[in-house]
């Protein structure tokens, strides 16, 4: 049992009602926000036997090459390079585009790796507010942040929801800026009939264990040309171009054969993973649609989603309970939702002193970060559990609203 599992003292309304709800609704086993769909172990072992026979463990082995080719075909991109993880892929993207000084405009509403990559490349992040619909960089707020120091825009397709790529491209062209997309969440997402990875100068993917498609740890970098891909390939291998040539300050970003083997297995089942998630996503929408204060993110036109995340916004005024209280209540019911992305990266001590990190500069991001909650979704999650999650949320709303109404009648302040 987690500390304080039956103690509801952190809730600001009627304790007894909520304690009763938790007692009745608590699931026997923890349900996490995501779980990887594991490949068949015997099949994986068979592929591993090949690695044992060949004794070729890393440095562009045959499985690495096969995965690179198969992924390029699956995703519909021409110039893809595999990586040991997505973070190193962003570092290399910046170095490959020679962005290692000055400023880059980026979003505070992302995983810390996005901004940290700038820091590691000696670039100053300039935080720009997000659009209330896409939850990605708001193009109408980018231009006012451009200075003579600005080198690039590092945007994120949060939850796999496409940025306004056309507007970002227009701004980049007018001001001579490069564009890198952190597409860590956007595996398989298509926009206007083609891969979202085809936009910008470079895009990176993450294949971390929490992602829709995983190689345990892993990632990829998608470039606009083969020349760039060759530079990327050297930089991810210590800058080595051939046995006697080092082209620049590279790093070790290579994916190994065991990761590639896992990825090949995953690729076989990824379509099923997406379609299972689609069904669950629709079920969530159906079951939570009528609950006051729970809002789904609206679909982005022309987008083929892969249902990688199930994010909702909790409006305390209508729901009767804050996002944080609902999050804590769900934990006590063994439902491990996540506050992706709270707190904003801009509020971390390493960035909070930057002028662009001021809350007044980021009102939409601040609001969304306080309201967003990602609910469990993954291919092997069963519909019955989704129903249980939704019933718990629904009941929490009813209990809290009733508690508030009663308190109001008695003239007691509840928040
Ligand atoms: C938006 C975003 N960018 C970058 C990363 C870093 O990817 P990785 O964990 O593969 O290094 C993540 C990881 O979860 C992420 O969510």
Image (cartoon, rainbow, N blue to C red):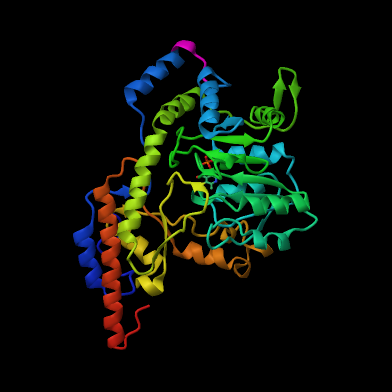
Which secondary structure dominates the residues rendered in magenta? loop
Q: Which quadrant of the rendered structure holds the C terminus?
A: bottom left
Q: Where is residue 85 shown, x and y percent of the image? A: 54, 36
Q: Where is residue 392 shown, x and y percent of the image? A: 27, 60
**Above-or-below relation of 184 to 12:** above
Please tell me in which quadrant of the rendered image residue 397 appears: bottom left
Residue that lies at the very extreme toward the right in this rendered image:
148
Left or right placement of residue 221 versus residue 248 in this view? left
Q: Is residue 5 visible?
A: no
Q: Where is residue 283 shown, x and y percent of the image? A: 31, 52
Q: Residue at x 61, y 60 (%)?
A: 138
Taking the magenta stretch, the answer to whether it contains residue 106 is no
Please tell me in which quadrant of the rendered image residue 18 appears: bottom left
**Above-or-below relation of 367 to 189:** below
Which portion, as a residue range, is magenta?
Answer: 53-57
Q: Residue at x 55, y 66 (%)?
A: 364
Left or right placement of residue 5 versus residue 353 in this view? left
- Foreground residue among 4 and 132: 132
Q: Where is residue 188 shown, x and y percent of the image? A: 49, 39
């Amino acid at each position: 049992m987690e500390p304080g599992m039956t103690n509801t003292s952190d809730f600001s309304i009627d304790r007894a009602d909520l304690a009763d709800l938790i007692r009745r609704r608590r699931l026997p086993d923890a349900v996490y926000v995501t779980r990887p769909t594991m490949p068949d172990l015997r099949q994986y072992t068979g592929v591993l036997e090949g690695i044992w026979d060949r004794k070729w463990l890393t440095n562009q082995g045959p499985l690495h090459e096969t995965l690179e080719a198969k992924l390029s075909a699956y995703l519909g991109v021409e110039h893809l390079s595999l990586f040991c993880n997505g973070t190193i892929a962003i570092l290399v993207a910046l170095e490959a585009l020679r962005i290692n000084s000055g400023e880059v405009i980026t979003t505070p509403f992302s995983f810390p790796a996005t901004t940290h990559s700038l820091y590691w490349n000696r670039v100053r992040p300039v935080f720009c507010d997000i659009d209330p619909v896409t939850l990605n960089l708001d193009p109408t707020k980018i231009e006012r942040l451009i200075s003579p120091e600005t080198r690039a825009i590092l945007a994120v397709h949060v939850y796999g929801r496409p940025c306004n790529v056309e507007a970002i491209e227009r701004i980049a062209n007018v001001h001579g800026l490069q564009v890198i997309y952190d597409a860590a969440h956007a595996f398989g997402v298509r926009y206007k009939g083609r891969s979202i990875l085809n936009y910008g100068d470079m895009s990176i993917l993450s294949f971390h264990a929490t992602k829709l498609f995983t190689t345990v740890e892993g990632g990829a970098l998608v470039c606009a040309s083969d020349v760039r891909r060759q530079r990327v390939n050297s930089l991810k291998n210590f800058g080595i171009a051939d046995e006697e040539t080092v082209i620049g300050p590279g790093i070790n970003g290579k994916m190994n054969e065991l990761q590639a083997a896992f990825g090949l297995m995953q690729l076989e089942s990824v379509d099923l993973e997406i379609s299972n998630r689609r069904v669950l996503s629709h079920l969530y929408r159906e079951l939570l649609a009528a609950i006051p204060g729970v809002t789904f993110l609206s679909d982005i036109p022309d987008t083929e989603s892969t249902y990688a995340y199930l994010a909702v916004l909790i409006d305390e005024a209508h729901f009767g309970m804050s996002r944080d209280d609902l999050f804590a209540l769900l934990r006590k019911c063994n439902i491990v939702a996540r506050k992706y992305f709270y707190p904003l990266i801009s509020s971390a001590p390493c960035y909070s002193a930057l002028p662009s990190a001021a809350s007044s500069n980021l009102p939409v991001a601040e609001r969304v970060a306080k309201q967003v909650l990602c609910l469990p979704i993954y291919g092997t999650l069963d519909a019955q559990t989704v129903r249980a999650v939704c019933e718990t949320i629904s009941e929490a709303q009813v209990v809290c609203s009733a508690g508030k109404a009663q308190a109001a009648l008695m003239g007691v302040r509840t928040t």
